[in-house]
Image (tube, rainbow, N blue to C red):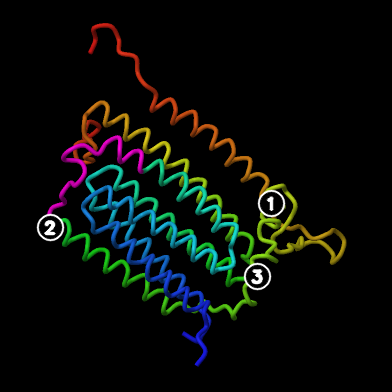
Amino acid sequence: MDINFHTFFFYLIAILTGICAIGVVVTRNIVRSAAWLLFTLAGTAGIFFLLNADFVGATQLLIYVGGTLVLVVFGVMLTAQGPFISMKTGAAEWVISTIVGIVLYSALTYSIFTSSLYFPNPPHADDPADSRNSVKLGMGFLGLGVGPEYHEPSDKVGATPPVRTSYLLPFEIVSVHLLVVLIGAAYLARAKRRRGGAS
Amino acid sequence: MTDPIGLNHCLYLGALLFVCGAVCMATKRNAIGVLMGVELVLNGANVNFVAFARFNPAFQMEGQMFALFVIVMAAAEAAVALAIVLNFYNNHMTVDVDTAEELKG
């Protein structure tokens, strides 16, 4: 019997990621919750690598695990004093939210199971050394078309070259958005000067 | 274990992450715990995007692009939300979201 190692590692990482995601929810200690979240995000990056999206996986590791999570951990450290490390949630709230969670997951899995979405098995995953993912993504961000070809419906065939989707405008919007967020976060979290005698 | 994985396996994982995030947002009283729930929800959406990018040939680039945009948005959202939480903590000496009721009508 030959084990498909791609499938084996997918199951392994997916089960570990699921366990860690449940750990984020059930643990009471906020510091442990952050640690579970770290493993969940890293496991998701592993899933991305297995799904032939190496650039997205690397970005997930760099930005999410290396950046966002460090930010969250700093927030935990700055506010984790005494009673805030483990705040208890009432038993009634636990029961209700567990029921709601199980019902929601059942509904989602039922709709996935009964959906008529079918795609034939994709071609074999690229060797990461031969993968052109980052090249294609970079071309898309630069405004060179990478999406599927789109023909103008009114045109005669071959009159104009087909249009392909590119992502220059969303890239610019995200850039400006990041700048605004940077300024806004620095403004919100700045050290306030105490007004004389007011406080 | 001998069959290749299909789209549905990835969708089940994405649904699990989404539900965990939603329950986390609902139950945590610590504001930073709520923020972790948001991160989990965004990750569940990202798994779905990348899975569709892998299995739907017409969505191959779009899925990865959207996943990248979601990652950037999540970073921005975390920065602003943490700034607000720290400001709230400085003013009220607590991070309990149940006490943030000044704007209650």
Q: How crowded is mark 2: few (under 14 residues within 10 Å), some or many (20 or more)?
A: few
| Rendered view: B31 above or below A1 | above
In the structure shown, which secondary structural element does the residue marked by tag 1 occupy? helix
Residue A20: mark: none
Kind of residue indicated by mark 2 = Ala
The magenta segment is A73-90
Kind of residue indicated by mark 3 = Asp
| Rendered view: B24 above or below B86 | below
Task: Please state, as top left, top right, bottom left or bottom right, where the C terminus of chain A lies in the image.
Answer: top left
Say left or right for A175 vs B7.
Answer: right
Question: For residue A74: magenta?
Answer: yes
Kind of residue indicated by mark 1 = Gly
- At horizontal 22% and vertical 60% (from top left) the residue drawn is A97
Q: How far apart are marks 2 and 1 (CA)?
A: 50 Å
For label 2, the residue is A92
| Rendered view: A23 above or below B102 | below
- At horizontal 48% and vertical 59% (from top left) the residue drawn is B46
Chain under numbered label 3: A
For label 1, the residue is A138
Chain under numbered label 2: A
For label 3, the residue is A127
Q: How many numbered badges does the structure rendering display?
A: 3
